[in-house]
Image: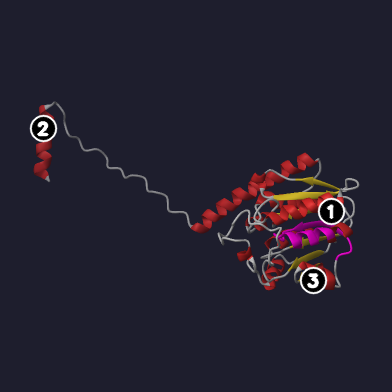
Amino acid sequence: MQLGKKVIERILAQGGYQLIRTKQTSLPKRPAAVSPDVQRDFVFKNFENLAAAYEYALNQIEGCELLTPNAMRPRLLTRLLGTPPSEAYYILTALGKTKWVEGDVCEFGVAQGETSALIANELASTSKHLHLFDSFEGLPAPTPQDQLKDDIFSLGSIEAYTGTMMTPMDAVLERLAAISFPATRFTIHRGFIEQTLRQSQNLPTQVACAYVDFDFYEPIKTALNFLDTVMPRGAIVIVDDYDFFSTGAKTAVDEFLAQANAVAPRYEMHVPDTRLGYFCVLTKL
């Protein structure tokens, strides 16, 4: 080592340079890796901030406090499966607009119950009752009106979806219990909708707001026909998968509107940009 140093000093001296020892410094240490839990917390805080800003903007557009601050709402929004936050906010806005419309709230097709919990959380400060309709046996068999438009699970045919998307009722009960929504505030109607509407003794007599996520033609058309008999003026129904997955959803809505508005306009329809999701909003005039 010393021999090497002397050689370097001799070479530098020939060029008029001198090797001088300086104070030794260490490179700054790299920050410790952020744990996955901390990363998730940062992501959630960012989403929470964005949600608050979006809700503020919505209230400004509506000219009133349609969406009041709610600490649990952002967490429930992040747990949604199959319903993007953009569509969820249409549901939340509909609940806000119909808060003073007479009637209860319905969800047709509850799946895992994540949307049910989101809706229930909004109803906690109201006296409205929540009615949840689902077969808990998965999707029914398609009808001729149901042609496969978007093969979301890559199953190859619309018939192959029969029985899929099945979730046990206990999963829904767990999600409602997790937000402490009282069992007296909701009713679960178990069974395929055509049978339920014939046999259930606890059907809502008036509905202010409804979310229909039945995917196929027949159950969607059946739900809309029922809602038409119990929705007062100002009531809102949102139908998911409009012009998506099965052609039956769009066909059911379009046929229902053609019949309902045949004599005079009874429903106003709004179809948001598809970047926000595939659904439509019907308001009873």
Residue 97 spot, x, y in % from top left: 82, 49
Compute the Cα span from label 3 to label 2: 98 Å
Q: Which residue is at a point 11% across and 42% down the rendered structure image?
A: 4
Q: Are marks 3 and 1 in contact (CB under 8 Å)?
A: no
Circle 2 crowding by C-alpha within 10 Å: few under 14, some 14–19, many from 20: few
Q: Is residue 138 magenta?
A: no
Compute the Cα span from label 3 to label 1: 30 Å
Q: Which residue is at a point 10% across and 28% down the rendered structure image?
A: 14
Q: Which residue is at a point 63% across and 53% down the rendered structure image?
A: 149
According to the picture, the residue beneath numbered tag 2 turns out to be 11
Residue 247 spot, x, y in % from top left: 68, 54
Earlier residue among tags 3 and 2: 2
Q: How many marks?
A: 3
According to the picture, the residue beneath numbered tag 1 turns out to be 99
Which residues, given as a range, are shown in magenta? 204-225
Residue 62 spot, x, y in % from top left: 79, 41
Q: Secondary structure at mark 2?
A: helix
According to the picture, the residue beneath numbered tag 3 turns out to be 195
Q: Amino acid at mark 2?
A: Ile
Circle 3 crowding by C-alpha within 10 Å: few under 14, some 14–19, many from 20: few
Q: Nearer the viewer, mark 3 or mark 1?
A: 3
Query: Can you name the residue that lies furthest to the top here?
Result: 16
Earlier residue among tags 3 and 1: 1
Q: Secondary structure at mark 1?
A: loop
Q: Is residue 219 magenta?
A: yes
Q: Nearer the viewer, mark 2 or mark 1?
A: 1
